[in-house]
Image (tube, rainbow, N blue to C red):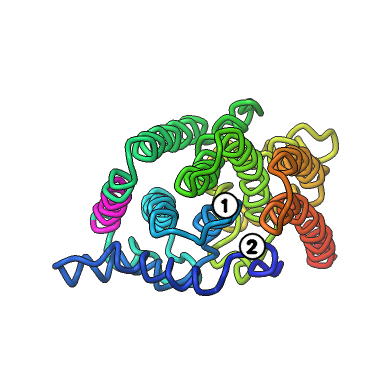
Amino acid sequence: MTEPDLFSLPVDESDVARLETCLRESVIGEDPFLNEVASHLIDAGGKRLRPALTLTAASLSPESVSKETLLGGVSVELVHLASLYHDDVMDEATRRRSVESVNARWGNLVAIVAGDFLLARSAEIAAGLGTEVAGLLAATLARLCQGQVAEVRAAFQIDRDEDDYLTAISNKTAALISTACRIGGITAGLDRSQIDDLTAFGEAFGMVFQIRDDVLDVIATESELGKTPGQDLSEGIYTLPVQRALQDRVHGQRLRELLGKPLSEYERDAARAIIAASPGITAASEMARTFAEKASHAASRLGAGLGVSALSALGMKVANNLDRAALEARERFEALAG
């Protein structure tokens, strides 16, 4: 899984550098301690997928990337970073992006308040970009909260409905990715049909992205993830590959006997092995491919050009990568079992 290649988009290096500068400047204020905490995950790096999508969407315009587009990308990335701060508190995570998590280093209270600070800075930036962007970001934040609440309410529910899962990840993940694309179109002054197609692309691609993450949480190694795998299982969050594995005649009952309660490390790894051996991984990958096709179809309506080609290919590239990762993981789990 080579993520830098997997998520690469045709964004000019100078624009990436400008984005990084804007991102770092956006969280710097008068309090050195808050500056350090708010910058912690920014300094740790990351894919910057969401702002890259904002810049790629804006590239459909013949004009160069504007400061407004850069700030739009920053506002979206700050929301994403804030969600990581809050997620790590809820998950009691100790690692994020291969560095110590904010909550592990400074405590839960500091992590929560710092996440709130990032959300406030995002809202402030969005307000400066006009009422449409500000309203869009506010609506997206509401969807993120709805998705998170739905996930918390479903914790440890073995018979969680698959539609409930899909709705939750649509709100929790696809909403922000869709907004990243839409803000790129708005700030670049694209016509409404293009903005709507970019939004549809982002919504479908966001589903691919989250299903991939959910599969990798089961099958990937700690070095690949940058955090402990199987965390969703430990927290009782039963995602698509788990749901499909539970339905399997051969493996479902064994898995059902393990789940429905907090897991020990041994039980977590045993559950991961059962899911990896089941058809659940393949079924989830097929679902991801269905959404990838929707994303590609939406991108194809945008016209021609390097940015359009990259967006059109992105979902399928992720789906193909997931298929390879699943095959490698199955072989690894089989070797461990042997």
Q: Nearer the viewer, residue 162 or 34?
A: 34
Q: Position of residue 314 (x, y in %)?
A: 71, 54
Is residue 312 visible in the rendered image? The answer is: yes
Q: Please provide the residue range marked out in magenta.
A: 110-123
For badge 1, the amino acid type reads Ser
Residue 331, magenta (yes or no): no
What residue would you read off at disc 2?
9
Q: Earlier in the sequence, mark 2 or mark 1?
A: 2
**Helix, strand or loop for the magenta stretch, by majority:** helix
The quarter of the displayed image where residue 141 is located: top left
Of the residues shown, which amino acid type is indicated by label 2?
Answer: Leu
Quadrant of the snapshot with the N terminus:
bottom right
What residue is at 75 percent from the left and 43 percent from the top?
300
Image location (x, y in percent) of residue 86: 37, 50
Q: Position of residue 327 (x, y in %)?
A: 84, 59
Q: Which residue is mark 1?
A: 61
Mark 2 neighbour density, 10 Å: few (under 14) some (14–19) many (20 or more): some
Q: Residue at x 84, y 33 (%)?
A: 249
User: Is residue 117 a member of the stretch shown in magenta?
Assistant: yes
Q: Residue at x 35, y 69 (%)?
A: 40
Rendered image quadrant of residue 9:
bottom right
